[in-house]
Image (spheres, rainbow, N blue to C red):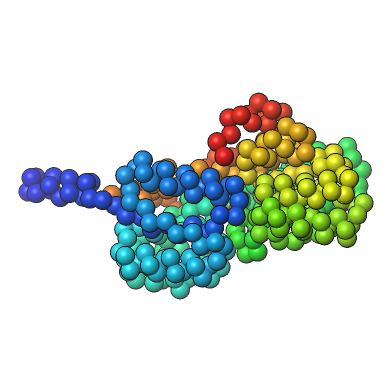
Amino acid sequence: VGIVDSNIESIQSTRQITLGYSQLGSESDWRRANTASVIESAKEAGITLLFENAEQSQEKQFEAIRSFIQQKVDVIAISPVVQSGWEPILLEVKQAGIPVIISDRSVNVSDSSLYVTFIGSDFYDEGRKAGKYLLDKMKDKPGPIGIVELQGTIDSSPTVDRKNGFREIIASRSDLKILKSRPANFTLEEGKRVMESFLEEQNNDIDVLFSHNDDMALGAIEAIEQVGLRPGIDIVIISVDGTRKSFEMMVEGKINAVVECNPLLGMNLMQAVKEIMGGKNLPKRIVLPESIYTQAVAEREVNNRKY
Ligand code: GYE
């Protein structure tokens, strides 16, 4: 019996694992770093990766997932563009007997057995960190203080959670007013366009910009400079992610603070794949520790940024 057992074990451990990965898009520097991390980590872990980019379309994610089912992959990982609408496709995957890992953004499903684990950041807490920074920054400034907000993609979990976390904290000061809040899809171009419209509509009332990611903040900086205002001084800017470009902007004084969101999830993902294939039980939630960066930190760290 002993010999048979060890044979089975060695067959299992040498069998090639195939992972189907549905990435939601390539809308930002964060996303590009996330994709690179997944591809490199799969190589390093010796896992065969089938990679599909959905270009911000949930429908395309469904197509990719169905093709992974047809190709009989061992595990499917999904970075979901939005949080709703996943139950039917996840049921299809479950019926095919393929385990699912949710990576980066979360899904809203009532049946949590539809996936094994969710690996990603605590976006609600990121919103709270942005709010806390703002309260501290404005502690000596009398109100009213006008805030505009660039949201990411409607119904995406980072947008929903960053928005709510931010509001929870700033609610403690009633003279902090959110003047306008609109989606700009996490891209530089849309961030610029939406910031232009904020500036036209609110002209002198904007004291603060809270941007749900760095790319939109970079676009907004262009819009602010176009109208002759100084980003980081006339308008305090708080962003999320921590890309190299946002660090450069902090060094130049144009962004005041950036809440960290770590895109380098590849190794955690590959480890989870291996553990699932090895029959281990995983926690339902895997969160990475994150902090907030200010201009002083940016000076020191800008050249060490990996993305
Ligand atoms: O903040 C943004 C990207 O889902 C956490 O998506 C991710 C977000 C990230 O486009 O830059």
Residue that appears at 87% across and 44% down: 229
| Residue 191 visible in rendering | yes
Work out whether 18 lies above or below 85.
above
Write down the quadrant of residue 74 in the picture. bottom left
Q: Residue 204's x, y, as percent? A: 92, 51
Between residues 281 and 231, which one lies in front from this camera angle?
A: 231
Work out whether 249 lies above or below 23.
above
Between residues 169 and 25, which one lies in front from this camera angle?
A: 25
Between residues 288 and 236, which one lies in front from this camera angle?
A: 236
| Residue 276 visible in rendering | no
- On the picture, is 307 further left or further right than 271? right
Please state, as top left, top right, bottom left or bottom right, where the C terminus lies in the image: top right
Q: Residue 36's x, y, as percent? A: 48, 45
- On the picture, is 166 further left or further right than 241? right
Work out whether 172 lies above or below 156.
above
Numbered circles on residues, count: 0
Between residues 73 and 141, which one lies in front from this camera angle?
A: 73
Q: Residue 131's x, y, as percent? A: 74, 46
Residue that appears at 85% across and 41% down: 230
